[in-house]
Image (tube, rainbow, N blue to C red):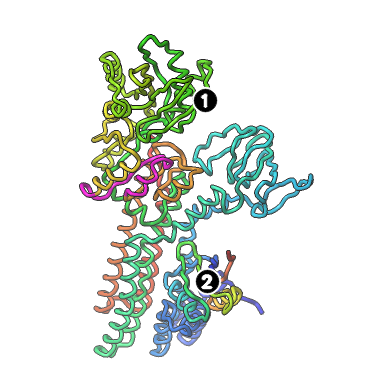
Amino acid sequence: MFKLTKKHIIQLSTVMIVLAFVLSRFLHLQNLAVALMLGTTFIAGTPIFKKAWSALRYKIIGIDALVSIAVIGALFIGEYWEAAAVTYLFMLGDYLESRTIDKTRESIKALLDLAPKQSVVIRDGVEMTIPADEVLINDTVIVRSGEKIAVDGTVLKGIASVNQASITGESLPVQKEEGMEVYSGTMLETGYLLIRADKVGEDTTFAKILQLVEDAQDSKAKTQKFMERFARYYTPFVVVLAVVMYFITRDVELALTIIVIACPGALVISTPVSIVAGIGSGAKHGVLFKGGESIEKLGKIKVLAFDKTGTLTQGKPVVTSIASFNGYTEQEVLVIAASGETTSEHPLAKAVIDYAQNQGMDIQQPESTEIIPGQGLRFEFKGKVYYLGNRKLTQTEHIQLSAEAEKSLQTHEEAGETGIILTDDKTVLALIYIADTIRPEAVQLISRLRKSGIKHMVMLTGDNPRTAQAIAKQLHLDDVRSELLPADKANVLKEFKSTYGHVAMVGDGINDAPALASADIGIAMGGVGSDVAMETADVILLSAELRKLDFALGLSRATVQNMSQNIIFALFVAGTLLAGVLVKTVNLSFGMLIHELSVFLVIVNAVRLLKYKETQK
Amino acid sequence: MNKTYQLETISCPSCIKKIEGMLKTLDGVESSEVLFNSSRVKVNFDESTISSALIKAKIHQLGYNVLSEK
């Protein structure tokens, strides 16, 4: 049997309804016109009636049922034109709406389409192409230029330049060679790689990003929940109103019109479309929102707390200078300190070791080490006991800082450098100064954020007060909290919450996960590859660029604004329509036209969010 | 057992209630959630009472094409 597609139905009924209009209005061929109107109602209405019926079987009165009642009612009272117009408009509106809704989901779909579909693996010496989700852990994967890497893995052989934009948001290709990590979803531009699959399928970072974005769409915002609840009471209320009005006025058409406008289309859809468009727009620019609630909260944030290392600074501390005392040379203290640091995982330890290695020092394992949390470490090297750490450590160990050492430490700290103190069990042997450069865009960003309405900006750091102050001053921050352990950061955030209300925390997502989790909104910067960051943060900036923060804030504000516009518009239309019907200026088909038009406009408004751009200043 | 069905684009919010309401009447379906924005249906059901194929068929009967499941 010939099956009518949606498009056919639309085309056919458009021709019929136009003909019917012309025949009845201008040619006065009423019988023929009525036949065409009935035909339109039948063709456009059948799918609606079918859907209404199937839903009614499960005792659900959907929008289709309401429209069906209105149409049947209109036919019953001989209003054939109204019946045809209502079915036609409803069908056309429904079609246009699903087309535009698809548009709001487009950027998310585009992202999902980036998922690698197939992969070339070598098994038992044979090269074969298999679907990406059939690759096993430890499979050897071959990727050639122009192909997509389908696993998270380690390069076994080959050199290639790989574009990791889908993961890091950084569009400049990166050189990959033996021993380096590669990610699924990234594109090999030139070269050739043999890769050992370490993570496959759903466990890859890229799959997790996709999952996150896909789930984000349906994690409902507060406003959305409210609107749905509202709509749930609104529809029954209007249906009851229609019945009551019928008994008062005995006017069937009035009652039917009320039923037609009872469908709260624009109201229910006003929030989700904005949010989906916002999430999609973010994903396109490497900003992942965990859901509608994250966008809504971020859009209203006035207080921002920043982690220092890796967020406001480059996160790559380097040794700038060394001061040695008690007759030790710089080389001697450096060897001792670097050897002690070999067992530490502290970011500053890496700076000391790197520096020593660059100087060609011979670093050896210490005989024993003991980490003193939040202070430093104690270690034994070549039969002697040493301490390496911050001021707190010298206090606990009762080691007096000489006046000379104290002065040196103060000057460097005031310049924003951090001093590591090396002592034996009695006196200070050396001060090693380390500085982490402030990100070049940080100063500008802070001033731009302030202009855009952020009232209070704070830096949280484990660093000493003087260094912290110096950096905060350079960045023009409002406040700074220093010498904080990760757990302290969470407490400080709690304090801010009670003073200022909502607080967002920006961090690198690796060592400040507790802080990210305890803020109202945790924003992880460049947290790729870190599962902790992906789980605890509410917003994830794929690339470690501060300007993405600006974008994320701007976009969430635009989304919140878009949502409000939609809600206000939808409420206004619903109210006006109801009033119009009651005073009898709005008839059945006109009510349907306005109703469908309002739904359409709400979606079109949301689509605008997809064009939201970063401010490139 | 948990399954997620990807449907073709759902455009009317009342579809949510329709699909959820239908699923509620099926024996063996413990809970279900229609995700409007991503046009997906998450169903938690007892395999010994109802098959995934039947759930799919029921959704299809209601007028929604099931594109994929996972």
- Residue under label 2, please give it: A10
Q: Residue furthest front?
A: A383
- Label 2 Cα neighbours within 10 Å, binned few <14 / some 14-19 / many ≥20: some
Position in image of residue B42 (x %, y %)? 50, 68
Residue drawn at point x = 75 percent, y = 49 percent: A128
Query: Is residue A597 placed above or below A363 in the rendered structure?
Result: below
Specify the segment rendered in magenta: A498-519
Does residue A511 show up magenta in the picture? yes
Quadrant showing the N terminus of chain A:
bottom right
Residue A40 in view in this figure? no
Residue A449 in view in this figure? yes
Query: Is residue A398 placed above or below A92 in the rendered structure?
Result: above
B25 or A284, which is in the foreground? B25
Position in image of residue A323 (x %, y %)? 36, 14
Horizontal side of residue A77 vs A47, given as left or right: left
A144 or A448, which is in the foreground? A144
- Chain letter for the residue marked with disc 1 in the picture: A
A111 or A243, which is in the foreground? A111
Q: Which mark is residue A42?
A: none
Element at label 2: helix
Does residue A486 show up magenta in the picture? no
Horizontal side of residue B55 vs A18, given as left or right: right
- Residue under label 1, please give it: A365
